[in-house]
Image (tube, grey):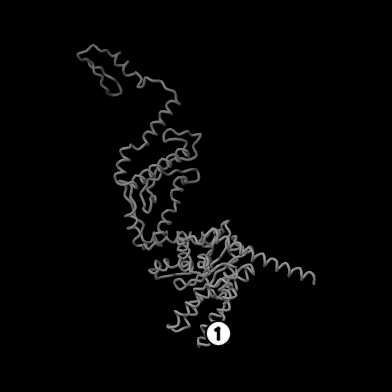
Amino acid sequence: MKTPQKGNGCTEVVEADGAATVDTVVQDYHEPAHESQTSRPERRRAARKQAQQARQVPLNEWREHLEHGLQSLFHAAGLDAIQRMLQEDTDRLCGGPKGRHLRSQRSAYRHGTERSFLSVGSRRVPFARPRVRGPEGEIVLPTWQAAQQGQFTAVAIEAACLAGVSQRNFPDVAAMLEGAPLGLPVRHYSRSAVGRRFIEGTARSLQELQRRRLPEKRVLALYLDAKGFQGWTLLVALALLEDGTKQVLGLKEGSTENTAVVTALLEDLISRGLSARRGLLVVLDGGKALAAGVRAVFGPYALIQRCQVHKKRNVLSHLPEGERASVGRRLAEIWACPVPQMARRSLESFVRELARGGYREAAASLQEGLTETLTWQHLGLDPALALARSLATTNPIESAFSHLEIVSGRVTNWQSGEMVLRWAAAGLLRAEKRFHRVGTPETLKRLADALDKHASRVLAARSAVEQRRRAS
């Protein structure tokens, strides 16, 4: 047998037990490595198919993730999808796969990878981000830019903190609720990072509330109330729509004793689509600036309904403890009277009775805005209706703040009014999702018809005044 041996660039043939010749060895050496002659398009198709198969994760690996929970499987699948999308972005910019790119289609070139992090749920997962550079510098891949702009973390942190989870404990709570990709280390958000994202989420809620356009549905009633919150006074506007749903429309820092603040809020609502031309029932507390602002902005088209709960509370505060229960029952009986003239006479008689009994401050409190506590009856509607009870008080606004006051009680450093507005906006939008529908289609229709009649009377009165002015 002859064995070829390489040395100094030559091939030597060693004679062994066979009869092989040098010609045979030389012939074997020059034989082509691949017998098949394939075209370039076929080779490219085969390469693409091979790359696609290489990127597919075997089902066994998916089963391994599934054994650690469905969330682990979802996380792993999501990361795998992002990796593929990043690879496609890179191939598109660089003219094709690495080593097989086309110069004519190339606008950038690969620049290695960089250790980065992706937000997976409320955690940060390390990720090898491919880098691409062009003539003017590094190019941010579209997939990576979209993955970094996710708002889930800020929204989740905002919802958790408003539900009572402290920013310090949020990472521990998130770790219990979320899975993590199998075999990948994760980083939790620090307390400061949680705080930054909470600010981001609440700022987005405030912006949404301040820019919210009014729905196409008609606004039948508008609740206006000033709420003290963490030492600040916030003016809130809440709408009752024609289908019985309630929606927060506006929020402004200020006092009910400042007509300019009330006027600014109402004018902002008008610029966003609110109209009183078909009549509007405005439910408010006893702030004089509130009523003055409503009349200045909406004119006679708005009907003011004083909050009976606030009025009753103010009257009882001027009475001794032993008289409060009986006076409260008397007021409830009068306000339940469906005839407005009879109810008004009963209230005026009760005012005189309180004054004769020596309770002059209680009598003065009841006398102030007395007629406006009977607006529902003046519309010709029955005060015994459930809708009437809902529109006789501004309690929907107070109930929206009740849970937020408990949650925000742990905050000790309220730095600015903007911080208070952010918290309040986030809490109001969260409470809005739990608002119950009020009234029935029939009672809501009756209210809408009554407001239409009132608007028609106002329009007719204005037309008559205009005709008299022209005649004179």
Task: Name the residue located 44 percent from the left edge and 23 percent from the top edge.
Answer: 39
Quick check: can you spot residue 89? Answer: yes
Of 419 and 8, the residue lying toward us:
419
Examine the image and state in which quarter residue 24 appears: top left
Examine the image and state in which quarter residue 434 appears: bottom left
Task: Name the residue located 41 percent from the left edge and 70 percent from the top edge.
Answer: 413
Above or below, 371 relative to 182 = below
Q: Find residue 225 and report its horizontal and vertical position in percent.
A: 52, 70
Of 387 and 251, the residue lying toward us:
387
Residue for badge 1: 352
Task: Name the residue located 44 percent from the left edge and 40 percent from the top edge.
Answer: 90
Q: Which residue of the protein is positioned furthest toward the top in this rendering? A: 19
- 33 left or right of 146? left
Q: Find residue 252 and report its horizontal and vertical position in percent.
A: 53, 68
Task: Name the residue located 55 percent from the left edge and 79 percent from the top edge.
Answer: 347
Of 191 and 30, the residue lying toward us:
191
Amino acid beneath label 1: Arg
- 79 left or right of 251? left
Q: Find residue 307 and report its horizontal and vertical position in percent.
A: 52, 72
Quarter the N terminus occupies: top left
Quarter the C terminus occupies: bottom right
Q: Find residue 152 and report its horizontal and vertical position in percent.
A: 42, 53
- 280 left or right of 21? right
Quick check: can you spot residue 261? Answer: no
Crowd rating for badge 1 (residues with CA inside 10 Å; few <14, some 14–19, many 20+): some
Q: Which residue of the protein is positioned furthest toward the right in this rendering? A: 472
Above or below, 81 relative to 427 = above
